[in-house]
Amino acid sequence: MSNTKDNDKKKRDNQAHQELKNKMEQANISKGTRQYSKKTDHL
């Protein structure tokens, strides 16, 4: 049996990815995008 692991993979920097997502989310909140309300306008 041969062991076929890929040991040359680079580790993902998940913290940097989360920081980028949080920055984008804060920017969207401040711009007012993606606002959903449960109240309906047509009743």
Image (cartoon, rainbow, N blue to C red):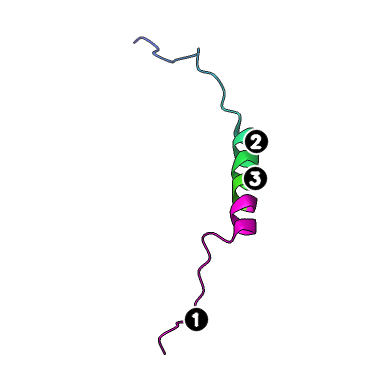
The image quadrant that residue 4 belongs to is: top left
- Mark 3: which amino acid? Lys
Q: Secondary structure at mark 3?
A: helix
The image quadrant that residue 42 belongs to is: bottom left
Residue 39 circle label: 1
- Mark 1: which amino acid? Lys
Q: Nearer the viewer, residue 32 or 5?
A: 32
Q: Position of residue 24 (x, y in %)?
A: 60, 46
Q: Secondary structure at mark 1?
A: loop
Measured in 3D between alpha carbons, the distance from the residue under mark 1 to the one under mark 3, in whole angstroms, is 28 Å
Magenta stretch: includes residue 38: yes
Q: Identify the mark nearer the N-term, 2 or 3.
A: 2
Disc 3 target residue: 23
Residue at x 50% of width, y 17% of height: 9
Q: Is residue 9 above or below residue 13?
A: above
What span is colored magenta in the figure? 26-43
Q: Position of residue 18 (x, y in %)?
A: 61, 41
Measured in 3D between alpha carbons, the distance from the residue under mark 2 to the one under mark 1, in whole angstroms, is 36 Å
Q: Nearer the viewer, residue 2 or 23?
A: 23
